Amino acid sequence: MKSSIGKKEHEKMSFILSDLHSEFYEKSRKSIRHCKPYLETIWELSILCPLPYYGKKGEYPINMDFFSLKKSKSDEFEKAIQLIQERQNQFLNNKFRVIFNGIELRRLIQLHTEKETMPKLYFIRFDDIVFDARLKFKGYLFAQIPRAIRPIELNGVQIRLRGVGIGGYDSTFLKYYEQIETIRSKWVSGEIFIYEGLESALNIDRDSFNEHDEHFKKLQSVIHKKLNLVFDEISKIAKERSDKIRDRKDDEIKNRMREIVTKQSKGKFKLSQIDSGENESIVVVDKEKGEIILNTAARPIKKKRPDMIIRVVELAYQIAKHTAETDEERDNLFLRFITDIFSKLI
């Protein structure tokens, strides 16, 4: 462990966890493994032990500042936050401490982890008799759309039995293979707190579960059912977000193309973009009106980027053809238009 800390890192080391957090863990971003064995061990112990969350209430583990007032008033959000606060109070009241090499540990979790993301918080609850024994658990799932959770070690769901993390965060969500292969699974993190039951499902290493145990199968089933709703919603939100960004980008492109056409034709033509039908020409020139019409419905190629390139080339050709007087001027104008529009739009 000592040898994993270089001279530069050694100078920044501290016995205060908050200093380590701001200096190393927040900057590691993608993976805690980049911090090397000594710092990685501190982080893993913090996550697995039955310790309180690090930081101020309302910031850890869920940063509530990033939720709108409307979302924070939802029933599911309030139940999830109430659960987190109850668990935090319980961990504090237990007064269980872990001191590693002079550093008092806390659980270093803060969600969201990426800027410019849309957060969602979900609540899970189950309490019933399963095979003659009570199984009771509560938990939360957090999603940030559309960016992966960082560090990647927080991606997935962690099962906590008597407050102890069993095997770290499971990025398969207890083998939820319906969605686990998609990029959206990287957006989700969560914790499940077991109040009663599941003890018999623990393997001897206390780091994993017997997957054939009835309590484990019920836990798995409840989480997967909730994940169906979570992934349906975040997929819908991601699509709506993507459509808005695309529409905004399309508007920017249209405005820039108008400016470029006016500039390169020296005011001789203005650009209009209308739907003239799929079977009509891509570009029509009306010299009397001083108008170049770009047919937005014509799709030479169904793929967006090649289709845009063909439109730009056709537009550049028509402007050069109807604006310049000589072949040399046409060639130069064509090249200027292509360079101008590609550098700004493509």
Image (cartoon, helix red, strand yellow):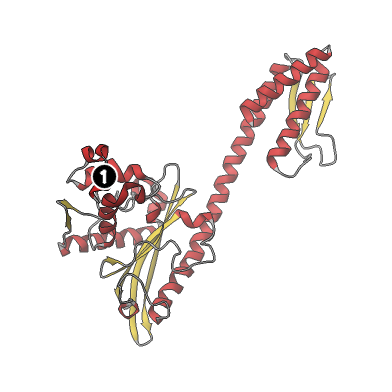
Give the left or right position of residue 88, taking residue 132 as reference: left
Q: Quadrant of the C terminus?
A: top right
Residue 188's spot in the image, x, y percent?
44, 56
Q: Compared to 293, does 307 lie above or below? A: below
Q: Compared to 202, does 295 lie above or below? A: above
Residue 112's spot in the image, x, y percent?
38, 49
For this orientation, the residue located farthest to the front is 3
Quarter of the image where one finds residue 96: bottom left
For this orientation, the residue located farthest to the bottom is 132
Please indicate, yes or no, whether residue 75 appears anywhere in the rendered image: no
- Is label 1 in a helix, a strand or a loop? loop
* Amino acid on which disc 1 is placed: Ile
Residue 28's spot in the image, x, y percent?
35, 44
Query: Label 1: which residue?
Result: 5
- Neighbor class of circle 1 (other Cα within 10 Å; few <14, some 14-19, many 20+) is some
Q: How many marks?
A: 1
Please indicate, yes or no, whether residue 161 appears anywhere in the rendered image: yes
What's the residue at 78%, 21% (across, down)?
319
Give the left or right position of residue 292, taking residue 156 as reference: right
Give the left or right position of residue 187, taking residue 85 as reference: right
Quarter of the image where one finds residue 202: bottom left
In this view of the protein, which residue sits in the foreground, 17 or 128? Answer: 17
In this view of the protein, which residue sits in the foreground, 284 or 158? Answer: 158
Residue 312's spot in the image, x, y percent?
73, 30
In this view of the protein, which residue sits in the foreground, 153 or 257? Answer: 153
